[in-house]
Image (cartoon, grey):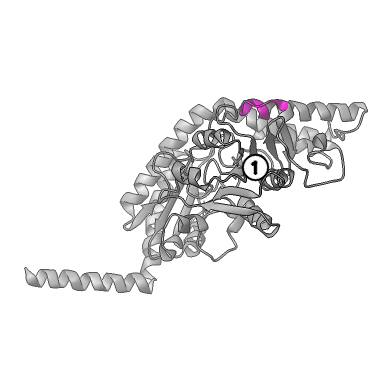
């Protein structure tokens, strides 16, 4: 049976060249990067090389990169650390209703600590209106935290414009760039970004490694304690193999970004057009053009997303109905609900995210299999059958009239 992986927004396979260098740092250059002997110095060299590779990708300085266990920890560091460091200045934070739960849940935690959070609405394409943002700013606003790319529907938010507004109002700006890092061009200086979160396993590096870009001079209180690693910002023995793999993956992503994005955009658009053409009562979720090259998110009426995923899996196709971090939840996507999509339609959402291993043959296979599965599920749906009956009656009346 053909196997097709279309869940790259959940995680990616480790690239062979990355796996090779990671293995070396597990078995040969295995020293603790904080040790002063030769083994430790060799490990430290790998860490600092990776710091430089990652900084280069976003036009930052190496000393502004701090390694974490992943994007979630980086988000927590940025948001909680900023709140604690600036609580005397103000206790108001601005974010959006469509953020990843690593941001939303962190903001909810801070609300319990006495901070106030404004959750900005988005439009039907998951796009943020700049006037809405401007009106939300208060004298005591200390942080704006907004994602670069929505992890579910792939909409690219206007980070440069948001950064300009934040800078004009002297407010710190944090960007969750987990879905865009290594996939879209990022210049933290041109975009006026003060903090940025990224994760390795979204760009063909190992899981369990991420980073926080922290602009030099930005006040940030530590949220972990126990060592002097990462200049006392993030204590704990460095994950040297993960860091080195992350650095190489970032460098390769930067070199290949332009060509890979052209290829993925072509495949993405073929998949979107094919689904909308072949499957009645299907709709695209997210912005049609301001969209991550590899992201396809559609709603298919009268079916349950979970049943759809199981049947796709039986055909060898790996997909998701939204964020992998909420896959155990039976609730409809908070992103789709924020976009104004009704409860019933939100339950029938499908996310197909493409990556390096996908081919045009994969797209053809999905377009062959998916319509058949949707039709089968709809035939099993009482709601769909009742609607079909109503339509037949309407057609019959129409024919009689003629």
Q: Position of residue 277 (x, y in %)?
A: 31, 50
Residue 392 to residue 10: above or below: below
Residue 148 to residue 276: above or below: above
The residue labelled by disc 1 is: 201
Looking at the image, which residue is at 51% across and 58% down? 334
Q: Toward the viewer: 257 or 13?
A: 257
Q: Position of residue 368 (x, y in %)?
A: 38, 51
Judge whether residue 10 can be spotted in this image.
no
Left or right, residue 104 beside residue 354: right
Q: Toward the viewer: 160 or 61?
A: 160
Q: Position of residue 135 (x, y in %)?
A: 49, 46
Q: Position of residue 234 (x, y in %)?
A: 79, 41
Left or right, residue 264 beside residue 217: left
| Residue lying furthest left | 402
Total marks placed = 1
Image-quadrant location for residue 402: bottom left
Element under disc 1:
helix
| Residues drawn in magenta | 54-62
| Residue lying furthest right | 37
| Magenta stretch encompasses residue 56 | yes
Image-quadrant location for residue 14: top right
Q: Toward the viewer: 71 or 283?
A: 71
| Residue lying furthest front | 139
């Amino acid at each position: 049976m053909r196997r097709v992986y279309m869940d790259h927004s959940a995680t990616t396979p480790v690239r062979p060249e990355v796996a090779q260098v990671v293995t070396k740092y597990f078995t040969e250059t295995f020293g603790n990067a904080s040790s002063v002997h030769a083994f430790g110095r060799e490990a430290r060299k790998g860490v600092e090389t990776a710091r430089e590779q990652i900084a280069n990708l976003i036009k930052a300085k190496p000393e502004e990169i701090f390694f974490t266990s992943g994007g979630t920890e980086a988000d927590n560091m940025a948001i909680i650390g900023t709140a604690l460091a600036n609580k005397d200045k103000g206790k108001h934070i601005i974010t959006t209703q469509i953020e990843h739960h690593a941001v939303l849940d962190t903001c909810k935690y801070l609300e319990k600590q006495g901070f106030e959070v404004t959750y900005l609405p988005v439009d039907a394409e998951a796009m943020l209106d700049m006037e809405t943002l401007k009106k939300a700013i208060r004298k005591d606003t200390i942080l704006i935290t907004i994602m670069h790319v929505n992890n579910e529907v792939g909409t690219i938010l206007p980070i440069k414009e948001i950064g300009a507004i934040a800078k004009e109002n002297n407010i710190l700006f944090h960007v969750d760039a987990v879905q865009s890092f290594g996939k879209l061009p990022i210049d933290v200086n041109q975009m006026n970004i003060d903090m940025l979160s990224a994760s390795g396993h979204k760009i063909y590096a190992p899981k369990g490694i991420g980073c926080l870009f922290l602009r030099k001079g930005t006040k940030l209180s530590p949220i972990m304690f126990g060592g002097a690693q990462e200049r006392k910002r993030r204590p704990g023995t460095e994950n040297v193999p993960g860091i080195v793999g992350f650095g190489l993956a970032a460098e390769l992503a930067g070199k290949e970004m332009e060509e890979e994005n052209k290829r993925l955009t072509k495949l993405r658009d073929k998949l979107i057009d094919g689904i909308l053409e072949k499957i009645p009562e299907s709709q695209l979720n997210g912005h049609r053009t301001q969209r991550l090259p590899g992201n396809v998110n559609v709603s298919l009426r009268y079916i349950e997303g979970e049943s759809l995923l199981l049947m796709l899996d039986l055909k060898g196709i790996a997909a998701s109905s939204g964020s992998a971090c909420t896959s155990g939840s039976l609730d409809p996507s908070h992103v789709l609900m924020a976009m104004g999509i009704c409860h019933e339609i939100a339950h029938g959402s499908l996310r197909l995210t493409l990556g390096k291993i996908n081919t045009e043959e994969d797209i053809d296979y999905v377009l062959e299999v998916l319509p058949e599965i949707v039709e089968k599920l709809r035939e099993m749906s009482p709601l769909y059958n009742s609607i079909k009956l109503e339509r037949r009656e309407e057609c019959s009346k129409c024919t009689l009239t003629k």
